[in-house]
Image: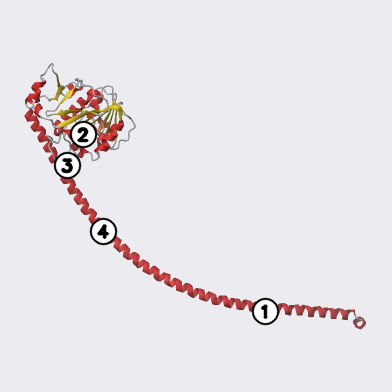
Amino acid sequence: MVFLDESTDSMSSESDFTLERVLPNDERTKFLFQEHTIRYLFASQFTDSKTVLDAACGSGYGSAILLESGATKVVGIDNSSEAIEYCEKNYKNENLEFKKENCEKINLDTRFDVAVSFETIEHLKNQDDFLTEIKRTLKDDGIFIVSTPNVDTYPSGNPFHHKEFTESEFKSFLGKYFSNIIIFYQFYPSSMAISKPIDIMNDLKINFFNAENYNLDDVTEKFNLANSHGLFFIAICSNHPIENIDNKLYLYRDTTDELSSPEEHESSHMDELRALNKKKDENLKKFESKVGTHIDQLRELNKKKDENLKTFETRVVGHMDELRELNKKKDENLKTFETRVVGHMDELRALNEKKDDALKHLRELNKRKDEDLEHLRNIIKEIHESSAWKLITKLDFLKKD
C-alpha cells in the first residue's frame, strides 16, 4: 500500500505549506482533502497501466493514489522544495518519483501517457506557458485532466488566483491546445463520474454508487444538481478521440451519513473556505508587516550607506587634494633636481675637459722626460766607451795599488 496515513506534525501549523497545500488527516483542510482525492480517483480511470505526470503535486497523496490505482509510473512535480521533501519522506515506491520543477518551464524529456493538474492553472501568471509545457510532455495520443474553480459559483477574492474561468472561457482556452475536450462538474458534497471502484476507496472511506445500488436521479434531485454548474470544472483533454465515460457517482464519506445533510456540509465547506481565506489574510497582513519592517530597516541601512559614502567621498576628495599638492611638490622638486643635475653635468664636462688637457700635457712631459733620459744614457754610454774614460779608470786603479 503506497498511500500512507501520515500525521501533519512534521509541518508547522503556521507554515505556508499547510495553509496552501492540503495534507491528509489535517482537520483544517478535511473537506478540501475530500475534493482533491475525488479528482484523483476520477482521473484514475485513465491512468491504469499508464505513465503519469502530476503537475503541482503538492503533498503527494494524489500521485500515490494514481500509482495505487494501477499506473505503471508516476512523476510528481512541484515548485516547492518543502513539498518535494515531504513527498519523498512520506511516499516511497520505485515507480513513484518527485521532482522540484516549475510548471511553466518543465525540465523533463520524458513524454507521458497522461498528465493531471488539479487546482493549479488559476494560480499561474503564465497559463499559456503551462499548457505549452503540458502538451510538450504528453505523447501524441496523451490525455490531460485539469481542474479549476468555476468563477460563476466559487467564492471570489482569493488573492493567490491570477485568472479564474467561466465554463466557456475554460473550454476556449483549452481548445487552443487540444481538439477534444469534455467538461465535468464537481459539486459539494464532492461528487464525480468515475468508471470503476478501486480498493483504495475503502482506505479513504469512500462509498461508490451506480445504477444497481443507488438511484442517481435521486442524488441529482437531492442536491439540486440539475440547476447547478458545480463549484469546479474538471476537463478531459486530448488531440485524439476520448472514449465514452460511464456516468457513475461516488461520494467521500466519513462515519456519519453526510449524504443525508448536504446543506450542513456545504455550509461547513464554505466556512472552511472562509476560515482559510481569513488565515491567508492574517498571514498576508503579517507578511506585509514583516515586509514593512524590513523596508524600514533597508531604508535605515540605505541612509547609513549614503552617509558612509558621503564621508568616504569627503575623505577621498581630501586625499585627492593632498595627492595633488604632493604631486605638485614632486614636480617642483624634480624640476629643481633636473636643473641641478644639468648644472653639475656642465661642471663635470668642464672638469673632464681640463682633466683631458692635463693628461695630454703629462703625456707630453713624460715623453720629453723619456727622450731626455735616453739622451743622457747615450751620453753616458759614449763617455764610458771613450779612451779618456778608460784612461781615468786605469789611473784610479793604479792609485789604489
- Answer few, some or many: residues within 10 Å of disc 2's Cα (few below 14, many 20 plus, some between 14 and 19): some
Residue bearing the label numbered 3: 159
Residue bearing the label numbered 4: 304
Q: For residue 401, what is the image quadrant?
A: bottom right
Q: Which of disc 4 and disc 2 is earlier in sequence?
A: 2
Q: In the displayed structure, does residue 134 sit left or right of residue 278?
A: right
Mark 3–mark 4 Cα distance, whole angstroms, equals 36 Å
Mark 3–mark 2 Cα distance, whole angstroms, equals 24 Å
Tag of residue 256: none
Between circles 2 and 1, the one closer to the viewer is 2
Q: Which of disc 3 and disc 1 is earlier in sequence?
A: 3
Q: Estimate the x, y position of residue 167 in percent, counting from the top left.
A: 16, 33
Above or below — where is 263 with respect to 212?
below
Q: Estimate the x, y position of residue 175 in percent, counting from the top left.
A: 23, 32
Mark 2–mark 4 Cα distance, whole angstroms, equals 55 Å
Relative to the observer, which residue lies in front, 122 or 30?
A: 122
Check disc 2 and give the amino acid type.
Ser
